[in-house]
Image (tube, rainbow, N blue to C red):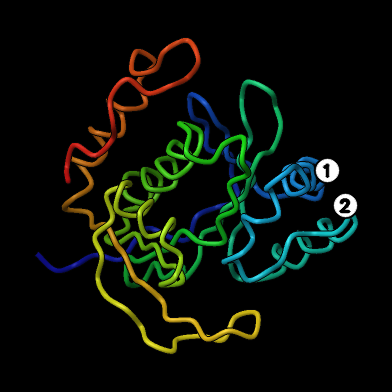
Amino acid sequence: MSPQPARGAPERRVLEGRYVRLEPLNVRHAVDLMAASTMPGGADRYRWLFHDAPRSVAEMEARIEIFNAGQDRYVAVVDRASGKALGQQAWMRIRPEHGSIEIGGVYWGLPMARTRLATEALFLFARHAFDDLGYRRFEWKCNNRNDGSKAAALRFGFTFEGIFRLDMIVKGESRDTAWFSMLESEWPALRAEYERWLAPENFDADGTQRTKLRAWG
């Protein structure tokens, strides 16, 4: 059977989860994202991103306008319990003709980092890419020195593919880029594990996991 292209690029639409809601990024999210960025430790999470932490709400609003004028499609990660935007992420390298797409521009603020909110935010992107749009390949990339991002990619079920040496210059520093992917053939098993892990019964009253996600590795 010949490989098939994806059905199209992701539209600017809401993706609903149990714990988070992904909304097209809008200037109305700027106040929440600024709050996440300025809480203790929040600015540190910009270390490996292309931008530094915003210095004001106005700067965050301007950044959102620039994001939305480009080819990437950014979303805000909204905590359904509080209604606050705690982070952002984006569809990047959108190539429906090849059935390939990337999650990038990820800023998960400290209130959602390493929680079921972050995992579900990733899951909603993967599920939409594979199940709704028919993508063959879902990518994750990061600075090769970003050990936290590389560990997260493996935990989420991505496969390490290699290093693009001297790939970029970011914030005046040379960047070797680590590439990871998951494929359509791998997705059914990954989806089942995500659904098992994200089920409410896998968490105690404080939201602490009872079992880990890494059933595949």
What amino acid type is highlighted by mark number 2?
A: Val
Residue behind mark 2: 57
Quarter of the image for the N terminus: give it. bottom left
Left/right of residue 82 with respect to residue 147 in the rendered view: right
**Residue sitting farthest toward the front:** 40
Residue 178: % across, % down: 36, 72
Determine which quarter of the picture holds residue 101.
bottom left
Q: Which numbered circle lies on residue 31? A: 1
The answer to whether 12 appears left or right of 136 in the picture is: right
Whole-number angstrom distance, CA of label 2 to CA of label 1: 6 Å
Quarter location, residue 79: top right
Q: Nearer the viewer, residue 201 or 3?
A: 201
- Neighbourhood count class around disc 2 (C-alpha, 10 Å): few under 14, some 14–19, many 20 upward: some
Residue 17, position in %: x, y? 49, 29
The image shows residue 12, relative to residue 17, as above or below, that is: below
- Neighbor class of circle 1 (other Cα within 10 Å; few <14, some 14-19, many 20+) is some
Q: Residue at x 37, y 23 (%)?
A: 209
Nearest to the observer: residue 214 or residue 128: 214
Q: Residue at x 29, y 53 (%)?
A: 154
- CB of mark 2 within 8 Å of CB of mark 1? yes
Locate residue 11 relative to residue 135 in the image: left or right: right
In percent of the image, x 72 and y 68: which residue is there?
69
Q: What type is the residue that disc 1 sits on?
A: Val
Question: Where does the image place residue 140, in percent across and percent down from the top left?
Answer: 39, 62
Q: Residue furthest left?
A: 1
